[in-house]
Image (cartoon, helix red, strand yellow):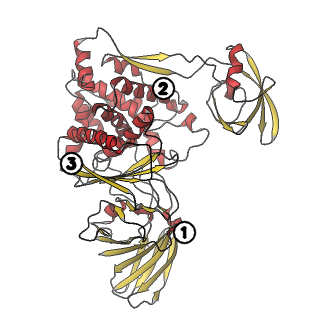
Amino acid sequence: MLSYQIKFPHPELHYVEVELSIETPDNKWMEMYMPVWTPGSYMIREFSRHLDNLIVQNKDGQFVDCHKYSKNIWRFYSQYSRHIVKYRIYANDLTVRTNHVDIDHALLNGAGVFLAVKGYEQKTHQVIIWPHKNWKEISCTLPHNENKWIRTAENYDLLVDSPIEIGSHKIISFDAGGIPHELAIVGLSNGDNSKLIEHLKAIIDKEVDLFGHPHPCEKYVFIIHHTDNIYGGLEHLNSSVNMVPRWDYFPRDKYLRTISLLSHEYFHLWNIKRIRPVELGPFDYMKENYTRQLWAIEGITSYYDDYFVYLAGVSSLDEYLKIIADNISNVVNTPGNTVQSLGESSFDAWIKYYRGHENTHNNQVSYYSKGATVAIALNFLIMHQTEGEKSLDDVMRALYEMYLIRPNQGYSEEELLQICEEVAGVCLRSFFEKYIFGVEPLNYSEYFEYAGLSLKEEVYQDLDFGWILEEKGNSFWVSKIDNGSSAANGGINARDEILALNGYRMTSQWRRSLHTYKVGDELDILVSRSGIVKSFKIEIQSPIKKSFVISRKEGISDKQQKILSKWSKI
């Protein structure tokens, strides 16, 4: 057994003190390493940069030489039966994937806290927590006996996959899907916890029912941090960490986004934590784990998150159709949609997705949002080809059955395609090559037509320069420009400060001044670029952005009605 003691003597300094006890053989080089990434967040994060003061002592307390051999590897020579490794982790980064410690709480994500010992990864890992005197609660799915502050993981993977929240947060317990659940709520919000639990129960029951098997967990924990403006989540084997802006339980559109996030992370219990691409497990914590299938992990999950919110009765069909239409608009209006494929977006997540800049939207596409639109198109295609008898649900069930048969082996790209084809009863290779591994625009209307739904394009009425402006005080800065837009063709750059339009000082009312202009007119734009004032002429072009609305058609066929009824449950 490896044993970690976790202490917080001065949480106001944002440090975690760790003491690792290792039973060691005599006369052997021991190697320890810190992961460079955490599963579910596909970017090299170099967690070892937060580690300092590492020392090694033998069982008699004598110091042992320990040398750092690379950015995240330490080695020492073992001549005693037991060694103690001590180090500190600086934890002042409040995100779902990192560590944060202050006087009020500690959020620990294992990849950035626990040194791994090479060759010991499959051994039992014990965690003994010494909480700060003001902290009374702990939320973590690692098992414990009488003492809740002592937790045990069967192996290092489980240790890394079990976030820990410690403090005086609010804990609410409830049952759903046949198992106990826990809400660990950190911070105040404008949420109604009773309503939240009611909706979560309905969503959980629907998700469990999809797979037709007992719940895969013995217990599940939602860790929910209420923040000023951070939004996001990270899935784990038996839990999730979620960041929600504290006032985002109202109005309704904000609430639907919040509940959709929780639905999303919960669906990952199956889609990635169990059903997974072959490249993503066993994990290599030392380098990138490349796959072209993040679209299937995140895109399909992004389809199901809002779908289950609707099926659970939390949103109406009209609200759900609007969410889908807005997502399609977002994808279609992203120039990178025809530049980068979903497969490329997945593969390059390590260097691109988490490192966006002013040109990202012009050459990249999100495997979340576009993946969701492709998933719903694939769903309607399968339903159409099977006369409404089968759907993407059957694909997910088949993948889960595969997992239950061979839990230690993920699926390959070819196996995913084969399962989709077996369910649909037709060849889908062309669909995959065009829309998943290619950049051919998808004719969404065709697929919605299969379900008797009309996808109509709405015309933008406002003149559109193709730029996004950030207002900072009384100044206006270009943050993004669409390729092919009026601004781009006229020579405006990202990071330009817009000073004046047609001789008038730029103000927050600038759009109102455009009512006298029409497509084809020219405007004089005065900008400051790196402190140098420049003048440009731009020609107003026809709006290039699109907006969509989805509605139910009248007079649809029996087949369309069957598909619509099966999908919408109406």
Disc marking residue 524? none
Vertical placement of residue 100 versus 357, above or below: below
Could you say which disc has been placed on residue 215 in the image?
A: 3
Q: Nearer the viewer, residue 495 or 320?
A: 320
Q: Position of residue 41 (x, y in %)?
A: 44, 51
Tell me where residue 257 sits by quadrant: top left
User: Is disc 1 in contact with disc 3, using a CB cutoff of under 8 Å?
Assistant: no
Q: Amino acid at mark 3?
A: His
The amino acid marked with disc number 1 is Leu
Secondary structure beneath dot 3 equals: loop
Label 2 belongs to which residue? 329
In the figure, 275 relative to 85: above or below?
above
At label 2, the amino acid type is: Ser
Residue beneath label 1, please? 13
- Within-10-Å neighbours for mark 3: few <14, some 14–19, many 20+: many
Distance from the alpha carbon under mark 1 to that under mark 3: 41 Å
Q: Earlier in the sequence, mark 2 or mark 3?
A: 3
Q: Is residue 290 left or right of residue 421?
A: right
- Residue drawn at the location 43% of the way across and 68% of the way down: 134
